[in-house]
Image (tube, grey):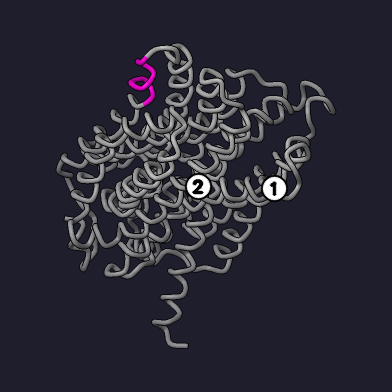
């Protein structure tokens, strides 16, 4: 095998490992919200305490970004990404093994909160960090295409969560699924993290980070670099926050809202609405995978900033239609979910290429992860706020406005961030699509 073939294999595997680890992030998001009726019962959680358990992971993510960003920028990318993958997998496995409230009492929900804090720390390191390590290895001309495949892990997880939930429940039966079958889904998440961990342990260190170490440009406190703070961080926050709240204010909260708020108002059975949501998740996730894989072509043909602008405009225009169809439990909502999924994938995937080009290598992991995870800590509030808002307006026509409000706002934030010209770019030769 030639040296070139070895390099291609390494950076392809690095992208695959990040695809799996990032997939676990969205797998957890959808799984936790989709299983909300079961988890509320198993761990004796109310609406507010359940969603706080959902959100506490994201409160911990900025801390994880600081910890893992420091380790990754100071001491190397590869082993640091392996540690955060291990932490995420261990947390997923622990939730699957956690005894119920009936078995250990109040210790069950308390332990669940602790596990999700640990999971949040691992996610804080992975979000931004895994992409930094993988993309620093990629040949510039292949970067947009491999980035699209890598980012699709997030949406493969959305698609697979719905599909696997349907499959597992179909095999064990609804009654057994609500008692213990749901735990199988968390075990599957742990397997994804294990595969990512093995790939990273067998992988190589980032060539860009190694060069920075040889040149002596590594910093004692990477996040304190003045080149991190300014216009470029604002761009990252606007684009990523827009996409984050679009997701949480859309498909991220439907698994709770449709069966628990919309369906009872319409006189439709909860189980019918839950199955309906599964299919929305499947179609939306599949659409996002298509958009993310195709995003490499749009980045190459349109340039990085236009790759955000056009899809975000279309998302703002189509969101009210998608919400109307979903809230009326129309069969056509699955196709709307597919279309908005494609648009979301096209807008979301270029983030990783763009954000890693906004910051110097010696502070890249810290900067991307911190900005990304501050937004992630804000995102779940979109789900909780909209769930409460929809609940208060479900009997009036205003429910459709409430249901699409955050999605429209998120689209406009992405547009605003993409229109701002960056103060500096750290692109390599051959990355003309970045400018």
Front-lying residue, 133 or 405? 405
Q: Nearer the viewer, residue 261 or 217?
A: 261
At a point 69% along the width and 45% down the height, the residue shown is 169
For image coordinates 69% across by 47% down, the residue present is 170
Q: Secondary structure at mark 1?
A: helix
Residue 379 horizontal side relative to residue 30, left or right: left
Does the magenta portion include 387? Answer: no
Q: How many marks?
A: 2
Task: Say which quadrant the C terminus sits in.
Answer: bottom left
Res 222 visible: no
As displayed, is residue 407 above or below residue 155? above
Q: Is residue 396 above or below residue 169?
A: above
**Quadrant of the rendered image containing residue 28:** top right
Crowding at mark 1 (Cα within 10 Å: few <14, some 14-19, many 20+): few
Q: Nearer the viewer, mark 2 or mark 1?
A: 1
Magenta stretch bounds: 397-403
Q: Residue furthest bottom?
A: 1
Cβ atoms at labels 2 and 1 below 8 Å apart: no
Dominant SS in magenta: helix
Can see residue 186?
yes
Position of residue 15 measured from the top left corner of the image (x, y, whole percent): 45, 62
């Amino acid at each position: 095998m030639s040296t070139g073939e070895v390099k291609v294999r390494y950076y392809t595997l690095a992208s695959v490992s990040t695809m799996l680890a990032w997939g676990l992030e969205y797998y957890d998001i959808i799984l936790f919200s989709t299983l909300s009726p079961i988890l509320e019962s198993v761990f004796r959680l109310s609406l507010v305490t359940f969603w706080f358990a959902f959100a506490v992971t994201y409160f911990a993510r900025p801390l994880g970004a600081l910890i893992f960003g420091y380790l990754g920028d100071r001491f190397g990318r590869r082993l640091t990404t392996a540690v955060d993958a291990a932490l995420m997998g261990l947390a997923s496995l622990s939730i699957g093994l956690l005894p119920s409230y009936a078995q250990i009492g109040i210790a069950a929900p308390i332990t669940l909160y602790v596990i999700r804090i640990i999971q949040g720390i691992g996610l804080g390191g992975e979000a931004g960090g895994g992409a930094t390590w993988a993309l620093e290895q990629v040949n510039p001309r292949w970067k947009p295409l491999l980035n699209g495949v890598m980012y699709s892990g997030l949406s493969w997880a959305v698609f697979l969560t719905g599909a696997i939930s349907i499959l597992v429940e179909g095999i064990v039966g609804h009654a057994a699924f609500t008692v213990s079958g749901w735990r199988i889904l968390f075990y599957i998440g742990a397997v994804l993290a294990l595969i990512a961990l093995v790939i990273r342990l067998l992988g190589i260190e980032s060539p860009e980070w190694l060069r920075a170490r040889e040149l002596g440009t590594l910093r004692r406190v990477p996040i304190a670099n003045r080149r991190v703070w300014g216009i470029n961080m604002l761009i990252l926050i606007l684009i990523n926050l827009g996409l984050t709240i679009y997701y949480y204010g859309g498909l991220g909260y439907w698994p709770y809202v449709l069966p628990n708020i919309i369906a009872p108002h319409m006189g439709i059975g909860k189980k019918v609405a839950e199955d309906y949501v599964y299919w929305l998740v499947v179609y939306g996730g599949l659409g996002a995978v298509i958009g993310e894989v195709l995003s490499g072509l749009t980045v190459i043909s349109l340039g990085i900033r236009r790759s955000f602008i056009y899809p975000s405009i279309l998302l703002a225009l189509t969101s009210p239609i998608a919400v109307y169809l979903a809230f009326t439990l129309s069969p056509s909502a699955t196709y709307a979910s597919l279309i908005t999924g494609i648009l979301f994938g096209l807008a979301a995937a270029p983030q990783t290429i763009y954000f890693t080009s906004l910051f110097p290598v010696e502070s890249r992991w810290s900067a991307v992860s911190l900005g990304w995870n501050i937004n992630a800590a804000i995102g779940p509030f979109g789900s909780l706020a909209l769930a409460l808002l929809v609940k208060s307006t479900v009997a009036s026509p205003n429910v459709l406005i409430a249901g699409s409000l955050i999605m429209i706002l998120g689209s406009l934030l992405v547009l605003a961030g993409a229109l701002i010209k960056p103060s500096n770019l750290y692109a390599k030769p051959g990355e003309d699509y970045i400018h």
